[in-house]
Image (cartoon, rainbow, N blue to C red):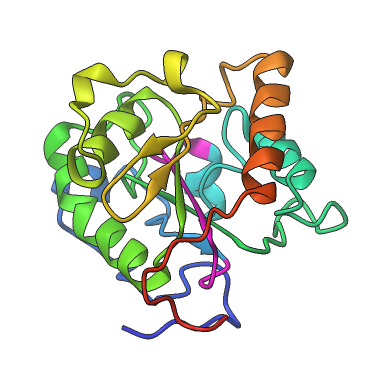
Amino acid sequence: MDANQLDVSNPFGMDTDCENCPALCETRTNVVHGYGDVGADFAFVVDAPGPGADASGIPAFHDAGGDRFRRILERCMLCASASPPEAPELSNAYVTSIARCHHPERDPTDEEVGNCEPYLNAELRMINPEILVPVGDRVLSELAVDYTTTDADALSVDEHHATSVRGRGFELAPMRDPAEMTEANADEFVAFFAELMASDYRQTKGRRER
């Protein structure tokens, strides 16, 4: 699977007609795959698409908390403030999700998240980021199983927001759900990110040249 960086929306050309979850095929408008810089050091992983992401085909930015999420990325110098709302211009950041289809009345089931796992794994394998940013408690729990040596039950986004969690091949930097965080929480993450950027966060993983 090759990336097309000329297209920042679904740059890996993943299936936009996926029928792995029959109950979601009629409720969704778009299969919402990842968005952003395929050479990114930072991969932000969010929960299932809400109505805004379902309509736009872009995860996170048009859902609840999307404005705060964008402001955080702008303050971290990962999103160009001058880019249009409908097409955020990301640099060194990729945004994706644990589930790809919207249901207007419920969260995705564990089975549905499992059906989407190959998409997420393929994206992370291709991008090979240095830092995974799980956004929200469910995402942190899902990623902890495969990407950390820590018991998922021992991790909570309330406790680990804006901190580093050692992972398997990746470092995790959990973030509270922007729809639920305070401005103080946002400031904490931006300050943490500034310290992270000032550190030698890149690991020796055989990364390709950017």
Of the pair 18 and 3, the residue shown nearer to us: 3
Give the image location of residue 23, x and y in percent.
Answer: 18, 42
Q: Outermost residue toward the left?
A: 111
Residue at 42 percent across and 51 percent down: it is 29
* Quadrant housing the N terminus: bottom left
- In the figure, residue 126 lies in which quadrant? bottom left
- In the figure, residue 67 lies in which quadrant? top right
Residue at 28 percent across and 67 percent down: it is 122
Give the image location of residue 124, x and y in percent.
Answer: 35, 62
Q: Does 109 sit above or below residue 43?
A: above
- Left or right? Give the position of 35 relative to 89: left
Q: Does 89 sit above or below residue 56?
A: below
Q: Is residue 141 magenta?
A: no
Give the image location of residue 91, x and y in percent.
Answer: 68, 64
Magenta residues, as a range?
37-51
Magenta: predominant secondary structure element? loop
Residue at 46 percent across and 68 percent down: it is 10
Q: Does 199 sit above or below residue 92?
A: above
Of the pair 12 and 201, the residue shown nearer to us: 201
Question: Quick check: can you spot residue 23?
Answer: no
Of the pair 14 and 28, the residue shown nearer to us: 14
* Quadrant housing the C terminus: bottom right
Question: Quick check: can you spot residue 98?
Answer: yes
Residue at 65 percent across and 18 percent down: it is 185
Give the image location of residue 107, x and y in percent.
Answer: 30, 27
Q: How many marks?
A: 0
- Left or right? Give the position of 189 relative to 201: right
Q: Is residue 39 magenta?
A: yes
